[in-house]
Amino acid sequence: MIEHFHAIVWIDHSEARIFHFNAEEVEREVVRAHGTGRHLQHRANVTGAGHKGVDKVFFAEVAAALDHTGAILLAGPGHARLEFRHFLEQQHPKLLERVSGNEPLDHPTEPQLVALARKFFKADDRMHAQQR
């Protein structure tokens, strides 16, 4: 695998689709959660909140896949990307420093996802270059 500086991670509770890329190339990696990936719904007269909890093993595998990435954009629907960001805050603060953005995003196609990331990082890289 060629190491690319930029990556976008689209994450939900069942999988993380990671795209490492540059202007010409894209490498795709998928990390799957170990649970069912289904959310439990709260029901009346049932003990507990109905939440499955954070899959720390899944999040650790996603973090490991990003270990050599320079700049990261998190994306995804619902709470999974926020839970992953919190996991990074608690378990991998050095990796969190490389997260450049956190975008709510439903279910785009892979080309749409990569196009969004390239556009985001084009602006982000330009902004960081001006700050130096």
Image (cartoon, rainbow, N blue to C red):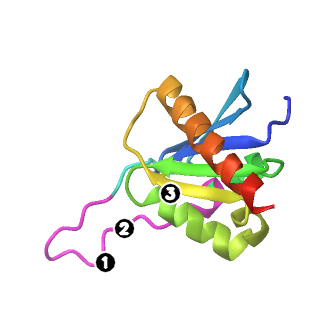
Q: Residue furthest top?
A: 24
- Location of the C terminus by quadrant is bottom right
CB atoms of marks 1 and 3 within 8 Å: no
Left-right relation of 31 to 95: left
* SS under mark 2: loop
Magenta range is 40-58
Q: Nearer the viewer, residue 101 or 3?
A: 101
The amino acid type of the residue labelled 3 equals: Arg
The quadrant of the rendering that contains the N terminus is top right
Q: Which residue is mark 1?
A: 48
Residue that mark 3 sits on: 81
Q: Amino acid at mark 2?
A: His
As drawn, 95 above or below 72: below
The reply to whether dot 2 and dot 1 touch (C-beta < 8 Å) is yes
- Name which of mark 1 and mark 3 comes first in the sequence: 1
| Residue 119 appears in view | yes
Question: Distance between the Cα atoms at labels 1 and 3?
Answer: 23 Å
The residue identified by callout 2 is 51
Where residue 101 sits, quadrant-wise, is bottom right
Badge 2 crowding class, 10 Å Cα cut-off, few under 14, some 14 to 19, many 20 or more, is few
State whether residue 41 is above or below residue 121.
below
Q: Secondary structure at mark 1?
A: loop
Q: Please give the name of the residue rendered at 39% of the width and 36% of the height, measured from the top-left corner.
A: 107
